Amino acid sequence: MQFWKKLTQEQRQQRIQLALQQNVNFSKDASLGYPASKLDSRVFNDDAPFLKDAPTLQTYVANPNNIGCHTFGTSEKAFSGTQEIEREVLNVIAVDIFKAKENEFDGYIAPGGTEANIQALWIFRNYFFNTYNAKPDEIAILSSEDTHYSIPKGSNLLQVEWLKIPVDFNTREIQKDQLEQIVENAIQNGKKYFMAVANMATTMFGSVDDPDIYSTVLERHNVPYKLHIDGAYGGFVYPFSNPNSNINFSNPKISSITIDAHKMLQAPYGTGVFICRKGLIENVLTKEAEYVEGMDLTLCGSRSGANAVAVWMILFTYGAYGWYEKISVLQMRTQFLCQELDQLNIEYFREPFMNLVTIHSENIPETIAEKYDLVPQQHNEHNKWYKIVLMDHVEVEHLTTFIADLKAAING
Ligand SMILES: *Cc1c(COP(=O)(O)O)cnc(C)c1O
């Protein structure tokens, strides 16, 4: 671990204080030109005593704007302190967790995984436009049918067709022969450029796609392609539970990754992380963004520097080993639930390195699903699955009462 350390409360507080000092201070400095200020002081008092020991809330009240991309070129001077905090977060995620080389990636903290995924598709689409003079109908997006709906959303926005690859009902694995067939048909119908999205844990099943399935098929057909990893769900779990994984930037075929800090890292909403290799993000430069110092290479405009601080605080409170321990506990709870289900002969899907169990719905009475807020795959009569996500607040005690209820319902 090059960047990821565990810091004491005092060290963390000092680091964030320094960052806030390096930003413009709307309480003291004569800052006339920005349509920005600290939060309204009639509502958000900036010298409330509890703020002293709460760096994230302090930043929230100071209200810095981390607009733009801070791994590339120059940036807005007024918020250089919280931009640096953002770079420290990106270094931990890109270099320490996802094995990029230092200074060889670009990225930013997006409002969410949806934007981070669409940012990837937008970059790839424009890369094909700029590099090959491609037309929109010559480009296709490939991903499994279990893919998050942000991909069809991006397909609709960017006007690039999405080709959905079927998965096996029980293993949730991409059906290779179907993928082969779909790519072949697409090429016959005039598609020349492909962007594939592999999941590092799908939302409903926690299944992890093998990204090499896409690169193998696309290289066999000799077509230009780009490969994105959607790690919105599993990005803070899978690399720790499966340290030998090479679904990261050590795989030269992978161009970009989405990781949500507001799911498994338990950061506040507004912390989807986008990271890509150098040389790509320029494809979405908006030249017209002249009032923003430096270049705007992001889909959103303004975004809070407090989000960067919140993610930074979590990462540097745990440190790499602390986080590894937390994930190990979630893995043990998942294991416990699976053993109990095995004893009841209840069928389920579980990716061995994920904290998610998706149970065949025929085994779960509706009353139990309702009582425990289990999430169905489909909110209608065709539903076949219910999922249980082993989050921090889902403890073994909850699981034992769930299992007892389930047993009673089945036997009664
Ligand atoms: C949640 C999720 C997203 C979208 O993330 P938001 O932060 O809700 O925009 C994308 N992909 C996967 C796999 C997800 O689980």
Image (cartoon, rainbow, N blue to C red):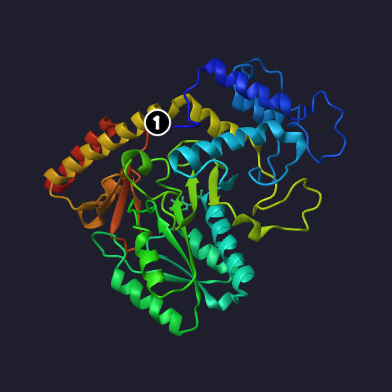
Q: Is mark 1 within 8 Å of ligand 1?
A: no
Which one is nearer the viewer's eye here, 177 or 29? 177
| Residue 191 versus residue 103 in the image, above or below | below
Residue 380, percent across and down? 36, 62
Amino acid type, label 1: Trp
Residue drawn at 11 percent across, 46 percent down: 411
In the picture, measured across the screen, residue 285 lies left or right of residue 312, that is: right
Residue drawn at 60 percent across, 37 percent down: 87
Q: Residues within 10 Å of mark 1 (few under 14, many from 20)?
A: some
* Number of numbered discs on residues: 1
Residue 227, percent across and down? 46, 60
Residue drawn at 49 percent across, 50 percent down: 258
Disc 1 designates what residue?
A: 323
| Residue 57 versus residue 239 in the image, above or below | above
Would you identify the image quadrant in which residue 305 lies? top right
Residue drawn at 83 percent across, 26 percent down: 29
Question: Can the viewer see residue 390?
Answer: no
Question: Which quarter of the figure is the N terminus placed in?
Answer: top left
Residue 75, percent across and down? 73, 42
| Residue 134 versus residue 395 in the image, above or below | below
In the picture, measured across the screen, residue 245 lies left or right of residue 411, that is: right
Which one is nearer the viewer's eye here, 55 or 384? 55
In the picture, measured across the screen, residue 136 lies left or right of residue 290, that is: left
- Find numbered disc 1 in the image and state the secondary structure of the residue it sits on: helix
Residue 188, percent across and down? 44, 84
